């Protein structure tokens, strides 16, 4: 039951975080439902050169759900309560705003809304710079509603030597929030 996760990739910069989560979570044996927004596909192509066909080929066990398929089981609380959590990585300011307002334009917004009402852990790996007052207020709003807001900003105390180590620090923080054991970064004084 707790081996199921919903992973959503939206059109914020940092598609690599969603991609790395796909790699790590499938390797760990998690059952993944993946929803990518239309802008998410654009940024996956722009930043990583990846298409839908590439992802389907590399992750054959992942269940890809179309962002407009609001009939998907994960749009229903009765099904989502069986999931360990919902991760939106990266999370755009637009998706954040929809979640904060409770408006539904796609399945990602709906799944987030359901996660909040059912108290299923909801993690938003937000990315923008700088943040406007609107962004900050939306983050506060979703945090008060029960979401965990993680900034896509790596620490440096583990002395990263590569881009991969920076990415893995952030991905490791996502896994920490889900209480999933991992060795992606070296902990303080470990
Ligand atoms: C290359 C690229 C990078 C982007 N980076 C960000 C970003 O870091 N943060 C953000 O909030 N939006 C970013 N955007 C804008 C979003 O893609 C846009 O607001 C989109 O409507 C978000 O839709 P979605 O939330 O449904 O994916 C970026 C767009 C492109 C094309």
Image: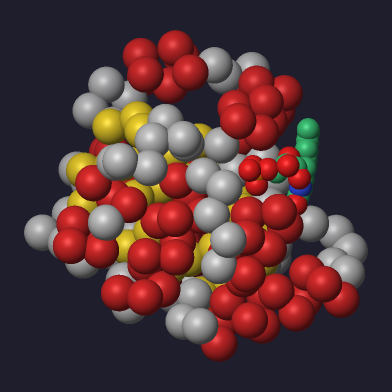
Q: Quadrant of the N terminus?
A: bottom left
* Residue 110 image position (x, y, % from top left): 44, 55
Q: Is residue 20 visible?
A: no
Drawn side of residue 49 relative to residue 180, left or right: right
Drawn side of residue 116 relative to residue 163, left or right: left
Whereabouts is ligand 1, in terms of quadrant? top right
Q: In percent of the image, x 49 and y 75: which residue is there? A: 147
Which residue, as the protein is rendered here, is positioned at the far left? 1
Q: Nearer the viewer, residue 150 or 142?
A: 142
Q: Is residue 47 visible?
A: yes
Task: Tell me which corner region of the image, top left, top right, bottom left or bottom right, holds residue 117.
Answer: bottom left
Q: In percent of the image, x 67 and y 26: which residue is there? A: 42
Drawn side of residue 80 relative to residue 54, left or right: left
Q: In percent of the image, x 37 and y 18: which residue is there? A: 56
Q: Quadrant of the C terminus?
A: bottom left
* Residue 84 image position (x, y, % from top left): 25, 63
* Residue 128 image position (x, y, % from top left): 79, 57
* Residue 102 image position (x, y, % from top left): 55, 67
Q: How is the image coloured?
A: secondary structure
Q: In percent of the image, x 57 and y 19: which residue is there? A: 50
User: How many discs mark residues in the rendered view?
Assistant: 0
Asked if residue 148 is positioned above or below residue 35 in the image, the reply reads below
Q: Nearer the viewer, residue 182 or 56?
A: 56
Asked if residue 95 is positioned above or below residue 130 in the image, the reply reads above
């Amino acid at each position: 039951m707790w081996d199921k996760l919903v992973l959503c990739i939206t059109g914020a910069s940092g598609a690599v975080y969603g991609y790395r989560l796909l790699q790590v979570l499938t390797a760990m044996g998690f059952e993944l439902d993946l929803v990518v927004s239309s802008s998410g596909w654009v940024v996956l192509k722009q930043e990583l050169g990846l298409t839908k066909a590439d992802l389907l080929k590399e992750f054959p066990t992942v269940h890809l759900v179309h962002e407009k398929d609001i009939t998907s089981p994960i749009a229903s609380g009765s099904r989502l309560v069986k999931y360990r959590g919902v991760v939106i990585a990266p999370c755009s300011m637009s998706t954040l705003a929809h979640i904060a307002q409770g408006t539904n334009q796609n399945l990602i917004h709906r799944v987030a809304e359901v996660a909040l009402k059912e108290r299923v852990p909801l993690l938003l790996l937000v990315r923008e710079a700088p943040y406007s007052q609107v962004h900050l207020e939306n983050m506060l709003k979703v945090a008060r509603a029960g979401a965990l807001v993680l900034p896509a900003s790596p620490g440096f105390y583990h002395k990263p030597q590569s881009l991969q180590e920076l990415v893995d620090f952030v991905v490791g923080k996502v896994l920490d929030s889900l209480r999933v054991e991992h060795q992606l970064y070296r902990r303080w004084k470990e």
